[in-house]
Image (spheres, helix red, strand yellow):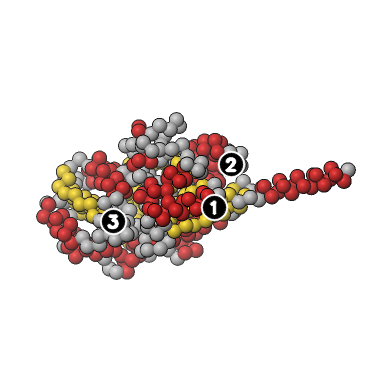
Amino acid sequence: MKLATAFLATALMATTAHAQEPIRIGFITTLTTPAAAIGNDMVDAVNLAIDHVGGEIAGHPIQVIFEDDGLQPELGRQKAEKLVRQEKVDVVSGFIWSNVLMAARRTVLDSDTFLISTNAGPSDLAGKLCSPDFFSLRGQNDVVPMALGQIMNERGVEKLYVMTPNYSAGTDMAAGVENTFEGEVVGRDFTKWGEDPQLDFSAELAKVGASGADALFAFYPGRAAIFARQFEQSGLADRVKLYTVYTFDQIALPTLQEAGIDVALGSVTVDYWSPDIDTPANVKFVEDFKERYGRLPSNYAAAAYDLIPYLKAAVEQSGGDIKDRDAVREALIRADYESVRGRYSLARNHFPIDNYRSLEIAPDANGAWSMRSDGLELAGLVDPYVDQCGNDS
């Protein structure tokens, strides 16, 4: 009898200990360099989401290990290796930059660990290098500029100049806008990027002015103030309409407003998310983020926030065991949770099929510059690489 009681107690202790094992998430982002503003926004959003779900998934506490990629692909790969080999995480997530994600992907996927990007969406991972264990919470890089190209068609743009940094996301963005834009592309510039990026755009902006373009498409994440100031100083704003993606966001706008760079006002961007989306999940996210951190969240924060309820839903709807990879993978594919963007689905390559909104930079009711919908929406855009993906689902 004593032996049976002791065995039962031991079994209960083992069961309790197993139930309390944390679900470990490795989150790679940029926490140093000027781009740390983006990474910190993502970290804040993840921490808020953990509080919103009660800090647990299927009875397991959530443990997030944040790592800094320093804006360097090789450092990002090293941090991914640390997370899967030393920390034994269940999921690796985050990733602002496509070149960092591409450097880290094999380390994660070869270790049979789920890889969930909250921002970067390189074309290779949407097509020939897609994986059953890779998922994205943002559209593939081409899709946002594809939507913007359609917006420009609607607005009657005839001649377009394209400027992006010369790395994988930059070339994807240029390809995306040119995929759908029906007018004439009168010039292109791919500027130096990386540890020593080009920060003087005067020569390129002079070429824009000489090209006869009536619109400029620009993609300069983390360089908004520098780019906007030089665009304003160039005198182009009176005759060239500015269209951007991932440049004038909620992280950049307070700085631009404080600096009085008025050229941002009235510029047009497009995204799957904006602070004024009226879904219950988004209203709570925006209000609580603003109350806790004293600022509006960015699109980077919105996707990072979604990671936690998305993973919680997948694990709990698949039976509660994150080690049951087949079941969790199937649940991740179905994306059955309340996203801040509203309902959406995944394509075969596990990138979202989203609705996109035309957004204009304008003051909100309190005078703060913000992104707001100008009423034009595009439904169900799919990236152009999905047919190259061999995933069964």
Q: Which residue is mark 1?
A: 86
Label 3 and label 2: CA atoms lie apart by 39 Å
**254 w.r.t. 138: above or below:** below
- Circle 3 residues within 10 Å: few <14, some 14–19, many ≥20: some
Quadrant (top left/top right/bottom left/bottom right) for the C terminus: top left
- Looking at marks 3 and 1 on the same chain, the residue that comes earlier in the sequence is marked by 1
Determine the image quadrant of residue 387.
top left
Residue at 66 percent across and 47 percent down: it is: 19
Residue placed most toward the observer, 220 or 263: 220
Q: Position of residue 355 (x, y in %)?
A: 37, 42
Residue at 22 percent across and 62 percent down: it is: 200
Amino acid found under the numbered disc labelled 2: Lys
Q: Which residue is mark 2?
A: 323
Q: Position of residue 210 (x, y in %)?
A: 11, 55
Query: In the displayed structure, does residue 238 sit left or right of residue 288?
Result: left
Tell me the SS state at disc 1: loop
Q: Position of residue 375 (x, y in %)?
A: 32, 48
Amino acid found under the numbered disc labelled 3: Trp
Residue 346 visible in image: no
- Circle 1 residues within 10 Å: few <14, some 14–19, many ≥20: few
Total labels drawn: 3
Q: Which residue is mark 3?
A: 193
